[in-house]
Amino acid sequence: MNAETKGFLEDLASSKTSGDWTEAFENYVDCLPNASIEYLGLDETSFLVERDKTLLFSIQMIEDILSESADSFPIGWLEAEANGWSFLGVTSLANNLGSPNDVGVYVRRLAETNFFDAFEDVIFVGAKTSSQLALDCSKLCRNSKLVLIQPERQVDQSVGDIVARLETVPVNTDPKSAQSAIVVSDPTYKDLVQDVSQQFPGDVAVLNCHHLGARTYQFLHAFGLLSKVLAMGTKPGAETTGFYAALRQEKRSSRAYWRNVLRKLDTDAKPNLSRVLCENVHERLGGRIFRRELQRLSETAS
């Protein structure tokens, strides 16, 4: 890595605003071989790096990258790099992906010009509020696969199903090209998972992540499990045992996870369970918050 590229990575890591991040990432991508950048509208930009026959297509708001990603890269970027996959990312400066027509027309154009046909696997990835847009765009690509992490409803309900609002290419009905999806979510949000199942035309596998709540994406990133999820996305029907075993191991040694569980117990007013949890976690992992909570519970009980 030359000094210029290293400088762009430092700029990326230190970015505090969406505008600074976009400028730094554009500079970095521009240094990479087989890379191109395209502006889709006032807010959305696409970044393409061509490698092998697997294409990871991620859609994400830059605010989510800045707040949730410790490495400052779009979701799936590092995993694509590590596996030698091609990467196509769409990022948005807006508070939500509020220009769906720009993104939808772009994906439709790629589909109609047979861009996706050059790849053996195309995996659309969305997290949080970008999940709906990723789902809609996946319908424009024949034989696509989909990975959604902690799907949330769009704040702007006018951002609906792109397929219904654009004159798009039809979804491929060839049974040999059946689509598949993986949804990673806390079971608390099962209604959102049901929404995905109703909208997605293929098989949907759900990875239930108990007690991760609204921080599911953040925890998966911190636990280093995104690579496992994305690898499963390339293989419909993949075994989930390894994922759950790794998740349990990471949960057990994470004080942040146990703080999340403790908050839920406090919200549900279960002091006895809170006391048992605090005693166990403080003995194994330490942590002032668990010690303080033990003291508070003891004072309340007395």
Image: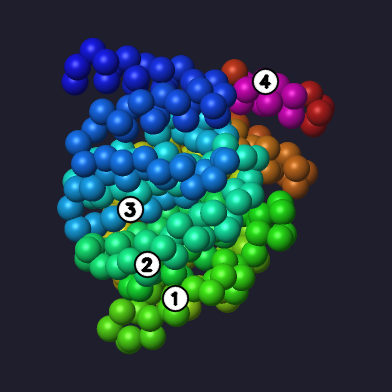
Looking at the picture, how far across and down is residue 135, in whole percent? 50, 63
Q: Which mark is residue 111?
A: 2
Q: Which residue is mark 1?
A: 169
Looking at the picture, how far across and down is residue 53, in whole percent? 19, 58
Q: Which mark is residue 292?
A: 4
Q: Amino acid at mark 1?
A: Val
Please tell me how crowded label 4 is: few (under 14), some (14-19), or many (20+) other residues with Cα within 10 Å: few
Q: In the rendered view, would you say 159 is above or below 228?
A: below
Q: CA distance from mark 1 to mark 4?
A: 59 Å
Q: Earlier along the polypeptide chain: callout 1 or callout 4?
A: 1
Q: CA distance from mark 2 to mark 3?
A: 15 Å
Q: Classify mark 4: helix, strand or loop.
A: helix
Q: Earlier along the polypeptide chain: callout 2 or callout 4?
A: 2
Q: Amino acid at mark 3?
A: Leu
Residue drawn at the location 47% of the way across and 30% of the way down: 22
Q: Amino acid at mark 4?
A: Arg
Q: Which residue is mark 3?
A: 56
Q: Earlier along the polypeptide chain: callout 3 or callout 4?
A: 3
Q: Is residue 102 visible?
A: yes
